[in-house]
Image (cartoon, rainbow, N blue to C red):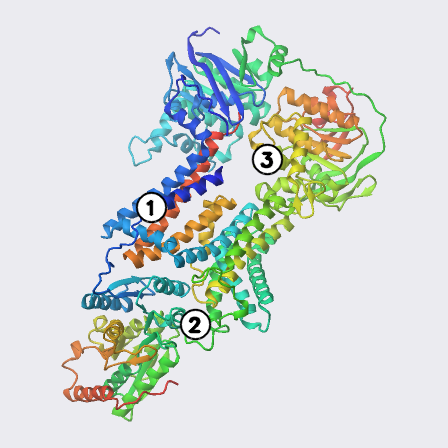
Amino acid sequence: MLMAEESHITFRNITKTFPGVLALRNINLEIKHGQIHALLGENGAGKSTLMNILYGLYHQDSGEIFLDGEKYALNTPKNATAHGIGMIHQHFMLIPNFTILENIMLGQTSPKPPKLEKDYFRKEILKVSAKFGIEVDLDLLVEEVSVGMQQKVEILKALYKGAKLLILDEPTSVLTPQESQELFKMLHDLNNKGTTIIFISHKLNEVMQISDTISVLRDGEVVATLPKSQTSQEELSRLMVGRNVNNKYDKASEPIGEEIFRIDNISLHDPHNKGRFLLKDISIQISKGEIVGIAGVDQNGQEELAEIICALRAATFGNLYMCRHDVTNSTTRQLIELGLSFIPSDRRNQGLVMDFSIAENTILETHYQKPFTRGFSLQPQVISDYAEMIVKEYDVRTPSINVPVKNLSGGNQQKVIIGRELSRNTRFLLVMQPTMGLDVGAIEFVHQRLLKARQGGMAILMISTDLEEVRKLSDRILVMYEGKIIGQADSTTSIEKIGMMMAGFFQ
Amino acid sequence: MSETILSPGSQTSIKARFFVFARNNLGIISVLISLLAIVLALLIGAILIAIAGINPWEAYSFLLKGSFGNRYGFGETLTRFIPLLFASLSFSIAYKSGFFNVGAEGQIYIGAIGALLVGAYISNLPPVLHITLTLLAGFVFGALWAGIAGLLKIFLGSNELVNTMMLNYVAIFLVEYLIHGPLKDPHLFIYQSSPILSSARLPIILPKTPLHAGFLIALASIVIVFYILYRTPIGYQMRTVGANLRAAKYAGINIVGVTLVAIITTGGLAGLGGAVELMGAQFRMVAGFSPGYGYDGIGVAIMGRHNPVGIVLAALLFAIIRVGTGAMQRGAGVPFPLLSVIQGLIIIFVIASSYLISKLSETTIGGRA
Amino acid sequence: MQKLSILMIFTILFGTFTACTPAKAVPGQTPTEATKQIRVGVIFSTTIKDEGYAQAAYNALMEMKEKYNLDVSFQENVTDAAIKDVLRSYASDGYDLIIAHQLYFTDPVNEVAAEFPDTMFAISGGFRADHPNVVAVDATNWEASYLAGTLAGLMTKTNKLAIITASESPIAKRMVNSFRSAAQAQNPNVTVKHVFTGSFEDVVKGKEMATAVIRDGADIIFTNCGVGNFGAIEAAQENGVYAIGSSVDLAGKAPDTVITSAVLSPGEYIKIIINGYMNKDLEWGKYYPMGVKAGIESLAPFHNFEDKIPQEVKDKLEKVRQDIIDGKITAPPNE
């Protein structure tokens, strides 16, 4: 693609600190006109921070930004819009019960105040949408349309406000694979019509698919800026993590030990439709020192099964046994005391209390036990020592254990959870989506920890929609489809075969 | 506090410089903002007072003279501080536990009724025992009253905000009925309850002022409440339930149990506030027993940002306003409606500034990319 | 850090204020060697702009301020719960005379007065004085009713009268008895029906009760039920019968229906108390029920009825009034 080679945005010596953290160090970066420029990096590398500074949500401590060669000093969101910079955030800024038209015209000055002049805006917006070939039905409520469509609305909104430069922050993290492909197609079209695009991502394949130029950020620094044609996934991955990432694990095969947890004929009625089962006759036995993986497409009963195992939901039929004791009617706390650990899929809402410090989060299940509580009182010193131990042991990158976990990156948050769950006397570990949204380095760390726990004799049940992950880690693989276990496999089974089962085809 | 990283030669906008300064000096900035808010409110008040034809400086001098300038005023301010503190503790502990209790006003009334029943109608008890039982009755009645809204929430999932608010009206009218009927003092012409017995009264701790031993109970309560919240397993569980209900469930915390404890303590604290006010200051139930302490307590808690020192200072400010504005009228003749306006201005400005401060601390500290 | 900061706000705030506050000299109360100004504090349960009970007293207070060059202070909207604190604030501020202008403040004043034996307290409209430093000045609550009963007894055609009160309290009973015996003293054939509304606030009930007694044949109704008076007068107007108002002159509401009103003048309480204090002719420690003679109770002017009431009736009324002043008529029972 031949495009004008002049600079659209130039960052010069940008530095930004948050209390105790150097988020960006001396960033120098040039974004050229008419390019799709990817910012690649692990969570916490500084990609979003840099873009938030450009858009004016944060302010650099020092350094300068140049726009079309001229100094751009007053970086505020309002000024950014005026200069043709549009940003699509990971979480959309739309009002659900407004129509798409109303959302796009929101904040625009009416030509004839105080009248709203909806028809005027409708015409103007349709002009823009025709120009860029983005089709949306302006009269639908935002809450009625799919996430992919909402993203289109955000893009159209930015274009309508005159964006010449679009920043997309992890745009595919909320999309289905098909929606992602549609998005890429649309971005290509926009790019062909002259829009510069900055694409923030930590997914190598996406970046390789869409960008012209790729800048890799690591620990707040730009480590490389490369044209796509001169690089490879392997190189990018090495640059991003700072070392080579291995794709295969050495699993010492251990003799399977005694039975630790048994799921016996569990069934669950659909509360909204009594004739239907959400789970049907599920039986799984997990033994000491093995990882049993459950593969399957999302929404096939995995969440319900996990909730039943953790006593957050009661099964309609069937029993649970832990170390051969019937625990069907036990409470969550009783199970935890018997040696259950759970790493939930949604760490922000299920696994952590975001406003609590790291130290407070490390004792979520055990705070009332000795040595954390003696008599009536919590023991702050004991808790601090314990949290320090976990932070050190699990390599949580934080200035202090008193930092609220909401200030940590996703990977470090997950490390806090894993540290907490594996540092107890765990016999049986239930893991859901352990690496969702994590970057390559963090994924490998989590996988190594799970294998280490298995080595130490833990019985592990892992539920994941990431088939690669299941194959890499599991001793046995069960495939779940529409609430049933429809097949067994192991790491030697071909990916195609497991994929067929996940789609509902029996052998 | 981190050191300033701004190098002297760097070219940054004034705004950016401000943000860096604000981040590095958040403490001082928040002091200045709060101070500015109070000054601004007083300034607007001064203009209104001047328009009313009164010297604003003189009027304001009475605000402080009335609330702190003499022994009696000082004692009265600290006496008003007591129910405000209980009400704000009640709101804070519930808020921290995810239970939005705006019913402290009603719980104060009902707690006082509980204290009245024990304090006025059970006789021949030694004072220490009688006082203890009377305080206990206040706590229990307040807790039971909050428990109505609590049980509705736990078992029917109905919104506690609406229920606690509505129960305020029920409580106030119930008390009105009681002092017009069953609990009316037969020796009085007017509609008031019988007084509690002297063995159930709290002693004055600062002679020649109304300041009573309830002050010490209030100070002890604030220590106990924050010790429970931050240093005990049950407090930890309450805060967890308040901050993230799902995470609490996943961690095996008994949500119903913890919520019940929160409801009992929030209602109990407000009820205790009512009991202490009855036992130390008023001795009888009268119509208008609480002039809105329960509602002021919410403002105190928000302004104090649910933090013990903040709550004490905010309660003190509210008490000063309550006592001082009376003195402004008596001393300088500021008309009553204007006093209400000034009270409102100070409260709105200070609460708005406390939001500004928390907003500022969020934007400058920020999250990470 | 945060905690320290908030603490600082307060210290700074108090620092500035106390530093700048004038030490002693407060305008309006500069004591001179020769004559020390008398300081009077008055406590109202409502605002002074209520166009009624408090406003009349406030106007009287201003009149007294001029007359004796008093240093006057007042506080409005004082609740039952706050009254004791306000009384104590005034007393500890060194006020010479503290007047509580509300019947319901009787008990609190008697309680607080015991703590400040050197301060003089007065309750205007109060009904008890327990201590040597308390005086209670009250209406008789029957004399004006007696005048109203006399007029009604002389004017009725149907020989049926009615009185509407808000409650059955002892005060109300005394008014009823007073009205009835006055009417029957003029006309033995008169019967007086008593009904009550149960509230001082209920306009509708006032009208309902009035309509009922009018159907029963009453041609003059004496209404004494707070806001309900308006309802009762409306009923009388609609049915073409007469009404006698109470508390204030209600003729303006229905000039051809309201013959007169049994008026209470609360400003007189304040005048009596302050005059009594300055001239030392009121005895502290006593309860003073006062009526027609003191000017606290009276009948309002007849306005439109001036010409419709026969001179003979006016003469008889004047004689009864004189008898009351002379003490020839004794208070009726209150039950």
Does dot 2 land on a helix, a strand or a loop? loop
Q: Residue B255: image x %, image y %?
A: 64, 47
Q: Secondary structure at mark 3?
A: loop
Amino acid type, callout 2:
Tyr
Q: Are marks 3 and 1 in contact (CB under 8 Å)?
A: no
Indicate whether A422 appears above or below B118: above
> Can you tell which quarter of the image residue A122 is in?
top left
* A298 relative to C244, above or below: above
Q: CA distance from mark 3 to mark 1?
A: 43 Å
Residue C311, x across and y down, in percent:
14, 87
Amino acid, disc 3: Ser
Picture residue at 65% right of the left edge, 51% below the top = B257
Q: Judge whether A240 appears above or below A415 on screen.
A: above
Chain letter, disc 2 residue = B
Q: Residues within 10 Å of mark 3 (few under 14, many from 20)?
A: some
Residue C22 at x, y percent in the picture: 29, 50
Q: Quadrant of residue B253?
A: top right
Residue A357 circle label: 3
Observer able to see residue A134: no
Q: Mark 2 near mark 3, Cβ–Cβ under 8 Å? A: no
User: Number of marks in the image?
Assistant: 3
Kindly identify the amino acid type of the residue bearing the numbered disc 1.
Ala
Where residue A179 sits in the image (x, y, percent)?
56, 24
Disc number for residue C105: none
> Quick one: quadrant of the C terminus of chain C?
bottom left
Q: Which picture quadrant has residue B354?
A: top left
Residue assigned mark 2: B191
Labelled pair 2, 1 in contact (Cβ < 8 Å): no
Q: Which residue is mark 1?
A: C19
Q: Residue at x 58, y 28 (%)?
A: A408
